[in-house]
Image (cartoon, helix red, strand yellow):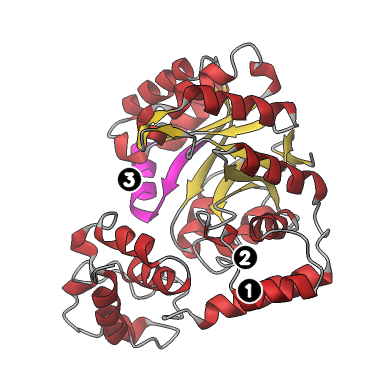
Amino acid sequence: MQYRTLCGEEVSALGFGCMRLPIMDGKHDQIDAGTAIGLIHHALERGVNYLDSAWGYHGGNSEPLVGRAIEGIRDEVFIATKLPPWSVETLEDCERILDEQLKRLRTDHIDFYMLHSLIGPSWQRLHGLGVLGFLERALEDGRIRHAGFSFHDHVDCFKEIVDAWDWDFCQIQYNYMDERVQAGTEGMHYAAERGIGIVVMEPLRGGTLGEPLPEELEAKRQERGVEWSPAQLGLRWVFDQPEPAVTLSGMNRMDHLQENIAVAAATAPGAMTPEEHELIAGIQAHYREKMLVDCTACRYCMPCPQGVNIPRVFYLYNDMSMFNAQRARMGYQKMTNPDEWASHCVECGLCEERCPQNIPIIEKLAAAHEALTAED
């Protein structure tokens, strides 16, 4: 296992993400506890020492499972978890939730504590409530050791949050297809230059970068003598960057866990070969050719007067073409607020006036809505 430094701590380059633990009967809130604890223990035995959970993962059952898994070995493990902004209305809620998390995790302190999944509105609301004072008190009394935030908005918002306080670390989505999405490379460098530790989530873009390569790319992989699988390549690309201290992976099968541990043990910054870089460049080019809208999620088009979430619509539209149409349609129809659908566009044109990429947004929104609401 490779180790890196995060907030002065020696952490494993591979972190165990506890959002996608094995479940029973297809029910997300029913964790297969025996299998999950076995996977966590195997990971710890192989050198993984960073476990990442959150208040709401698996319907609130992830943290208690982690607490069971680390019983008797607490001092050998770094625990990360998160405060859910959507459950906070007062600072008393922050105190209540943190105290409950300590009970769930069967510990008297949390090593890495985050404000969860920040976007502009949730950050502004928490900041207005005085959440930074709460974090300072929790640091002072030892309930948390390091304070940070996880993030899912545009890079300008990311920089605003970075500059608002003396954060210890942050957690960002990052992979070879999302260099310009959310915080992206620009945000990662911005935080690192200010001494803020980096934790990466979604290194395989929700698993899509671990799917079998298209036939022509698989032929190129073999021609170049690259032995790593698509999933291994995706992880190697992140491990190859010097800034991330921990790269999280949600592992719910032993073969995936063993594969990821092998990559983490073999990959340090700068370890990728020219052949691997060339192959990934080809994969990027292939998928980008299938991109339907060249949207960088800069959000200059926002807010839409009608409430359309233009960046999310285009993200899902691209995902439909590039990776998995069924998943993208589900993401639009089941996991996107209907008030944010592209069908609410009234063609006012304000978004097109603001778009630095000169995207014909009105036309693309109509096409996206038709495609994302079509029958599978």
Residue 84 circle label: none
Q: For the residue carrying disc 1, how many other residues have a C-alpha within 10 Å: few (<14), some (14-19), or many (20+)?
A: many
Chain-order first, disc 2 or disc 1: 2
Q: Is residue 243 above or below residue 57?
A: below
Q: Residue extending furthest top?
A: 72
- Do the residues bearing badges 3 and 1 touch, measured as CB atoms within 8 Å? no
Q: Is residue 261 above or below residue 63?
A: below
Residue receiving disc 3: 125
Residue receiving disc 2: 176
For the residues marked 3 and 2, what is the alpha-carbon distance in whole angstroms? Answer: 32 Å
For the residues marked 3 and 1, what is the alpha-carbon distance in whole angstroms? Answer: 40 Å
Q: Which residues are magenta?
A: 114-130
For the residues carrying marks 2 and 1, which lies nearer the camera in this image?
A: 1
For the residues carrying marks 3 and 1, which lies nearer the camera in this image?
A: 1
Q: Nearer the viewer, residue 248 or 38?
A: 38
Task: Locate residue 253: give its quadrant.
Answer: top right
Q: Nearer the viewer, residue 40 or 242?
A: 40
The structure residue drawn at horizontal position 42% and vertical position 81%, both measured from the top left corner, is 292
* Residue 125 is inside the magenta segment: yes
The structure residue drawn at horizontal position 31% and vertical position 40%, both measured from the top left corner, is 86
Q: Amino acid at mark 3?
A: Arg
Chain-order first, disc 3 or disc 1: 3
- Do the residues bearing badges 2 and 1 touch, measured as CB atoms within 8 Å? yes
Residue 283 circle label: 1
Residue 221 in picture, x, y percent from top left? 73, 71
